[in-house]
Image: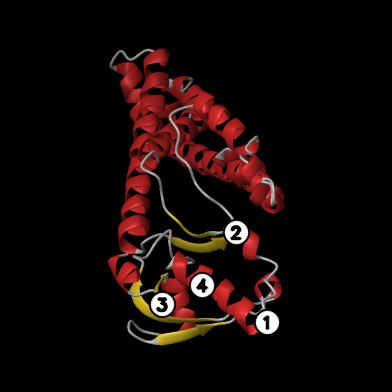
Amino acid sequence: MDEVERNPQGVILGRNHLRNLNKNLGERIKLYGLGDFKGLDLELEIVGAFPAGRYDTLAVFHRDYYNNTFDAYARDHNGRQHHLAGRSLSIVWLKVADLESFRRIAWQIESSPYYTAPAVKCETAASGFTSFLEGFRDLVWGMRWLLAPACMFTVLLVIANAINISVRERRLELAVLKVLGFRPLHIFFLVVGESLLLGAGSGFASAAGSYLLINWGMEGISFPLAFFDRFMIPLDALWWGPAVGGLAALLGSFLPAWSAQKVKVAEVFAKVA
């Protein structure tokens, strides 16, 4: 940012922009205005790059150079102002202590006579993101209520099938436990506890491995969605993994554990004999 302050035509680019432009630090680029920004052409020098991650699709350059472009447009068009000259600033972020402070500041801004042409609208970050992501609502809904439950159900079936196979292959061991004095309830909780330990442990191992691989090894998952370019695994995944794995193991082990406690010693040893 210091380079941008010293060089009015300096620009800091995200990794995606550098890759798409095939440019390096120190090179110059020409930025042409399209649509509403037609006629606002900028010559910029690349003075820095953002670290990989959340800023891959962003770029930053000096606001004074941007504002001076509107003055240059008026000079080149016989004093006629660009139609965005009075609204060159699109969004401002303010951080407040609480919702009551936001309401007070929003009222002061929206009721001020200085911010009527154009009118200034104040909204919380959650409201702004909701409006911006409205077009992706169906996609998010499908991932939350269709994809996630389907994945959970698949894991549950795999665990239940694996435990059921394990119980059938260990019928002799279960019969020996009954001979040694283990009650059916003991065997039930033994099977459930073993499954719960394996499910929670594997869930934690999977979550920790994903967290390290994606956040540190891959520097996020590249999946452009709206103004998000990369998605990181949150730290909360370290308890989501054991919770989901443990819950799936608990549900999937109930029926196999129920059948394990009903193993009949006489039938098992008769087949062995």
Q: Mark 4 — residue?
A: 68
* Residue hosting label 1: 77
Q: Nearer the viewer, mark 3 or mark 4?
A: 4
Residue indicated by mark 2: 226
Estimate the spatial distance between the alpha carbons at disc 2 and disc 1, rounded to whole Å.
35 Å
Q: Quadrant of residue 227?
A: bottom right
x and y, in percent, of residue 8 in the image: 39, 74
Is 204 placed above or below 247 here?
below
Q: Nearer the viewer, mark 1 or mark 3?
A: 1
Give residue 69's mark: none
Coloring basis for residues: secondary structure
Q: Is residue 145 left or right of residue 157?
A: right
Q: Is residue 97 above or below residue 48?
A: above
Indicate left or right for 134 with 214 as reference. right
Q: Is residue 110 visible?
A: yes
Which mark is first along the chain, 4 or 3?
A: 3
Q: Amino acid at mark 2?
A: Ala
Residue receiving disc 3: 9
User: Which comes before the other along the chain, label 1 or label 3?
Assistant: 3
Q: Amino acid at mark 3?
A: Gln
